[in-house]
Image (cartoon, rainbow, N blue to C red):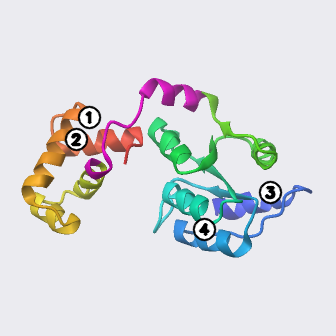
């Protein structure tokens, strides 16, 4: 519903043409490959493939397309990861529609846009302390899986999983793996 409403509102702008819509990150990548738009507007939370992963794939496969992230999840870690993935704009959804249209025009003109409050929060939060493998293990632990289940899923030994979890707990300054998962998710590190 939100996607359709945004497409309709943007379609009312004389100089903006909506050339495609997608329900999942995977579909978004396919639509961008097929239509080759100037700009792709993605959400962070998308089924099948999240918006950050989709942004990286779009940047890799369709370098002429500039990616904008529009999300309700204004977390510093998400901002940093989105920019590293190739996004050129990061906005929160509570902005009025006319501001979104103006932002699209600015991005089309070559600018990079970041919500100022979120940029300040990202700078003060510092970089993600977790390594890619620690993120993988914490993500696998998020559903309450056992050490053995995580080890099987990630093709690691149980001892290696324990080591990664222990390091992640230390780096997130938490007491156990579930707290580490919650902290990492709330910071946008996962």
Instruction: Tell which circle, 2 or 4, labels the residue nearer the N-terminal end.
Output: 4
Q: Position of residue 179 (x, y in %)?
A: 23, 40
Residue drawn at 57 percent across, 72 percent down: 27
Q: Say if mark 2 contacts mark 1, CB within 8 Å.
A: yes
Q: Say if mark 2 contacts mark 4, CB within 8 Å.
A: no
Instruction: Tell which circle, 1 or 3, labels the residue nearer the N-terminal end.
Output: 3
Mark 3 Cα shell of 10 Å, populated few (<14), some (14-19), many (≥20) = some
Q: Say if mark 1 contacts mark 3, CB within 8 Å.
A: no
Q: Main secondary structure of the magenta part?
A: helix
Q: Is residue 141 magenta?
A: no
Residue drawn at 60 percent across, 62 percent down: 58
Residue drawn at 74 percent across, 42 percent down: 96
Per the image, label 4 sits on a secondary structure element best described as helix
Q: Quadrant of the N terminus?
A: bottom right
Q: Position of residue 32 (x, y in %)?
A: 66, 68
Q: Is residue 120 magenta?
A: yes
Residue on which disc 3 sits: 10
CA gap, disc 3 and disc 2? 42 Å
Residue on which disc 1 sits: 172
Q: Position of residue 100 (x, y in %)?
A: 75, 46
- Please identify the quarter of the rendering in which residue 125 is found: top left
Which residue range is magenta in the image?
A: 117-134
Mark 2 Cα shell of 10 Å, populated few (<14), some (14-19), many (≥20) = many
Residue on which disc 4 sits: 28
Residue on which disc 2 sits: 168
Instruction: Tell which circle, 3 or 2, labels the residue nearer the N-terminal end.
Output: 3
Per the image, label 2 sits on a secondary structure element best described as helix
């Amino acid at each position: 519903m939100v996607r359709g409403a945004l497409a309709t509102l943007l379609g009312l702008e004389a100089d903006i043409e909506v050339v495609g819509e997608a329900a999942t990150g995977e579909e978004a990548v396919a639509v961008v490959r097929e239509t080759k738009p100037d700009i792709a507007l993605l959400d962070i939370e998308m089924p099948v493939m999240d918006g950050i992963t989709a942004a990286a794939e779009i940047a890799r496969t369709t370098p002429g397309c500039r990616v904008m992230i529009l999300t309700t999840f204004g977390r510093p870690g998400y901002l940093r990861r989105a920019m590293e993935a190739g996004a050129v704009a990061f906005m929160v959804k509570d902005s009025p529609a006319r501001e979104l249209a103006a932002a699209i025009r600015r991005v089309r003109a070559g600018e990079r846009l970041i919500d100022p409050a979120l940029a300040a929060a990202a700078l003060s939060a510092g970089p993600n302390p977790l390594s890619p493998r620690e993120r993988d293990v914490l993500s696998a632990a998020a559903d309450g899986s056992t050490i053995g289940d995580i080890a099987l899923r990630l093709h690691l030994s149980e001892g290696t999983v324990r080591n990664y979890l222990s390091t992640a707990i230390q780096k997130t300054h938490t007491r156990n793996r579930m707290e580490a998962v919650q902290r990492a998710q709330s910071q946008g590190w996962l």
